[in-house]
Image (cartoon, rainbow, N blue to C red):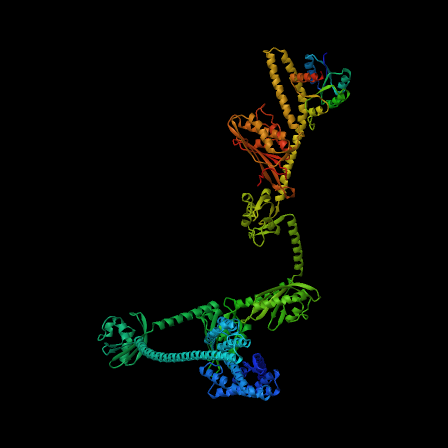
Amino acid sequence: MILPTAPQMPTDVLRSLGILVLLVAAYFCAGQLGLSASLVGKQVSLIWPPTGIATAAVLLLGLGAWPILALASFLTSFATGAPVAFALATALGNPLQAVTARILLNSTGPFDPALGRVSDVTSFAVLAVGISPIVSTTVGTAGLCLTGVAPWAEYLAIWPVWLVGDAMGVLLVAPVLLTSFAGRSPFRVRRRTEGTVLLLCLLLVGASIYGGLIPRDIARPLSYFGFPLVIWAAARFGPRGAAVATVIVAAAAVSGTVTGNGPFAGNDLTANLFYLHGFLSALTIVALMLAAALEERAESRAALQAAHGALEERVAERTMELRGANSALRAEVIERQRIEEALQESKARLRRILESTTDSVYVLDAEWRFAYLNERAKALLSEGRELLGTTVWEAFPDAVDGPIWHSFHEAMVNQAPTSFETFYQRFGNWYEVHVYPSEDGLTVFYRNISERKRAAEALRRSDEHLARAQRAAAIGTWEWDATAGAVTWSPETYRLFGVSPETFVPKREAVLALVPEEDRAAACRIGDMVLLGQIPTPSDVALDHRVMLPGGEVRVLRREGGAVLDPEGRPTGLIGTIQDVTAQRQARERLRESEQRYRLAARAARCAVYEWDPRADRVEYAGSTENLFGYTAQDIGSAAGWWKDRLHPSDRARTIRSLEAAFTQGAEFWDAEYRFRRADGTYAMVHDRAYTAYDAGGVPIRMIGAKLDITDRKDIEQELRVSATHLARAQQFASLGSFEYDADSGEVHWSDETYRIFGVAPESFTPTIASVWSRLHPEDRDKVDNPVDLIRRRRPSLSELSCDYRVVRPDGEVRLLHRECDLVFDDVGKIISVIGTLQDVTEIRAAERERRELEAQLLQAQKMEALGTLAGGIAHDLNNALVPILVLTDLTMSKLPEESSERTHLEVVLQGAERARSLVQQILAFARKDQAQIQRLDLGETVCEALRLLRAIVPSSIRFEEACEAVPPVLGDATQLQQALFNLITNAAHAIGDRCGTIRVELGMVEDEGLAPGGLRKRFVHLAVSDTGCGMDEPTLQRIFEPFFTTKQIGQGTGLGLSIVHGIVTRHGGRIEAASQPGDGTQFDIFLPALTGEPYEKDAVA
Amino acid sequence: MTKQILVIDDDALARITVEQVLASTCYRVTCAADGEEGIRLFRSLHPDLVIADLIMPIREGIETILEMKREQPQVTIIAMSGGGRLGTPDILKMARQLGADYTIAKPFRSDELTAIVRQSLARNV
């Protein structure tokens, strides 16, 4: 750490000030601490820590620190109440000691205040601890005596104590500061746990052994226990650890000794002092030495390692260099190989070129014999023969007297080189032959030119195709050479003029003769220009003129072309094309007419057509803007802004935004609806539709559109919407949906309510015949005609058009629908659609059925009542009538002899009368209605009681089965119910007759399917009587409850039994049902309302 | 002393039949064709037993029975009926509750009639 002696920066000043304050404060505090262990007055201390601080300060900060130290020393002494003179003496002596220590230490060589070397520790121990305190001691003790604090006589006694105090201050305090601030590693504790354990041990040992916690006699032999701990600190935590550890031990020992405790107390003061200081010196020096030695060893090991590392690095570098050299060598070798290969390749290529030469060469001698052939020639001509020495005509006899033969002979005779092209049949190829004659013979080069020949042929064909294409496109070409006066026409040009190349010579006059009088000037104008030496521009040449064809047809021809110039730039002729544009002309004419018609149509359609060039922002309105919006042509602006200004404020932003979006997206088509201000200030509803053309960069260049006034249509649409809404509501209220089947497209359209009726959503369901019919109840699907069936019938019946059927909704609910529909015909009687309505009649039909049932029940009740009245009257009169019959027959019989035939006859009369009496009793029972003794009763008991009786009556061939559950109570008349059961079982027994059979009686509970008022389920007690008897057919079953209806023989039944049962059950508020199949027995089910809320033994409903 | 029996019935056949049977078993039988006549005879004859039909014109049987019982509570009355018309409860049961001592339903056998007549007359002894 360096003290900035000449601070230059404000921060340095601050830092120096900080150090100053800290130093003075530390010195002062250390002084106070030292004085607490003072021996002589308040001036001489057992141990004087400020000396250590001063020494460390000068060693760390430099000699410049001494004024601060002087100040600190003065303040410390002055604070003890010492005389100012003494304080000045210490202010001189104490810093002098520190300065002396620094000078001495630096004189022996470089001193490292970190105390990391044994030599530094040795110098420190000898010079700083041993010698430098002599200065401060001598000055201080003298000051003490001079100022009269101590008498001169004690000078020699105080001096050694002062010296030892100062020396110990240096020895103990300075190392801590030096190692802390000059240490190599930054100040932080590694091995935190170990440090903590060590610290605890130090504190424990310090407090117990040196601090006096244990008795002195025990502590004294243990006083060397400080060593292992201090050595531990030195070994593991270096000089810094050693210094701190010794300070802790010293602090404990000093405080112990001062308070008269610990191993060093107990003797006289001086002895104590020397024991203590002897121990602390040894401890501190050993610890510092050991730490320094270890530090040095660690350093030398690190240096060794660094050296080792450097060596290895060097080796690695050298290795790399070698490797680099090696690879460079290898690269060179490879390069050499590559060059050699390239050389080889080059030679090979040359060879291949030489080998693949196409020219063949051979030499003939004067006798036509082959004298030399190159490889090509050999390969071509030899055909496996040895040609050298043979004559060419022997080898190729087919060439004799051919073109080759003649050419060769000619060349030989003339001794002139010749070339020709020939097709040699033998090889099937064209050859270009160069013949060089000499006196010795001929040298012949030849080359196969078949490919070139074929290309030439292809070119010729291509020309022909061009001519044909010209003909097809009705484009001819022409050329006029003014200097030669020659005109060349392509075949198509002749055709266009309607003349034949064989008979017509395209001379100026001849051509003009074909052109109508009025076009002639135009037609010959450019020719005249050329003749006058003027150069016609392409626009001069481009002209249309008519020709009169020989057949009388008039054709419009268009000429285009340019001048032909000689090297001096003078026009020498013209060249160009000619085209028949008659059709184009006609098309253009038609287009013009069409446009005119369109304009008229646009006017009629209340439509303003416009064309807008967005780049130039020019708008042209072609239609009837004035008619539509009331603007005159002068009013209408030519920029788009005029249009934008007249948009309704609420629509403006939206419309312009959509237009810009269309442009950005490069959309070809744009349409929008907006309100547009008319000249009179009102707004028209406008439907604007436009097409936009873009350039290659996507910039809109042209927009053509139409603004259509749809104000009226919008009103109608609004009305239609309202009407449709009303219709939809009406359909919803009536549960009435509508549908339409389009015969042409096969599409089915539904109203919203129809979707609701089918329980489907318009978003997820598309009605088609197939999809709709798949929703029908499977049983109804084939019974109902679909629209296609109806159309096929052409004249469907009313029942086919209107019918009921069931549909199954997606959730499984079945709805009953009523359909009314009709066919729609067009003017010519073709069926165009089927339209109709669908009504959800589920509830209506259910209500109708209920009403019918109620009516039937009422009718039945009325019938029964009428019968009851009748029966009552008849019974009364019959009973009266029977009185004399029965009584007087009895009377008469009693007066007749036992065996008389009269008596026997009267017996029969009695039997008849008895039967009549029985009949009347039954009729009365039937008619008797309000005798019921209604009470709460358990039907189980009632039934059991009746069955006990009945078992005795029913024949033993019939088996009884009972299955009676506990049931809730009912309100009823036990006698009547027993009567009902009695009647049912009697009937069952009759149905079984003499055969064996079973009658089964069951009692249980059921819940009604419907909900009773108040949301409660209605519970019924169910009494069932079934038999295995003969059963009955459906018509019989329909009538069994009618009074006097019987299937039994006359005299066996009254026909009232089941009527009575029916009456009883009905009067109990219950219902009775019968089910039967002939031969399978019959079952009667009686349902009586259970008393709700009443507990019963077992809840059968579970 | 021969017992006096008053038979009141609007049905002539029934009336004659009852008279015949009872006369043959040694009772004195007087007949009335309706309630009014029955009451008149009842007052003059003081019969031991009255056999009265219940549903009769002019004066109803039950009314007649009530009248007779009021005038002469100790008289024995047999109510006789061929059954009620619609809506009437068991008319014989009603008659019994209103004063008739015995009831007999038409039609009946001769021994049924003689048995109940004998039983009712024995009551008075």
- From the viewer's perspective, tell me whether residue A93 is left or right of residue A367: right
Give how far across and how far down residue A627 sits, in percent. 67, 65
> In the rendered view, would you say A21 is above or below B66?
below
State the residue in front, A216 or B123: A216
Q: How many marks?
A: 0
Image quarter where the N terminus of chain B lies is top right
State the residue in front, A338 or A440: A338
- From the viewer's perspective, tell me whether residue A1088 is left or right of residue A682: left
The single residue placed furthest to the left in the displayed view is A389
State the residue in front, A599 or A962: A962
State the residue in front, A701 or B38: B38
Give how far across and how far down residue A639 sits, in percent. 64, 71
Quarter location, residue A396:
bottom left
Quarter location, residue A339:
bottom left
The answer, for residue A9, to whether it is visible in the render is no
The answer, for residue B108, to whether it is visible in the render is yes
Give how far across and how far down residue A473 sits, in percent. 48, 68
Give how far across and how far down residue A548 sits, in percent. 52, 69
> In the rendered view, would you say B48 is above or below A1096?
above
> In the rendered view, would you say A819 is above or below A86?
above
What residue is rendered at 65% in x and 51% in y? A729
- From the viewer's perspective, tell me whether residue B117 is left or right of residue A137: right
Image quarter where the C terminus of chain B lies is top right
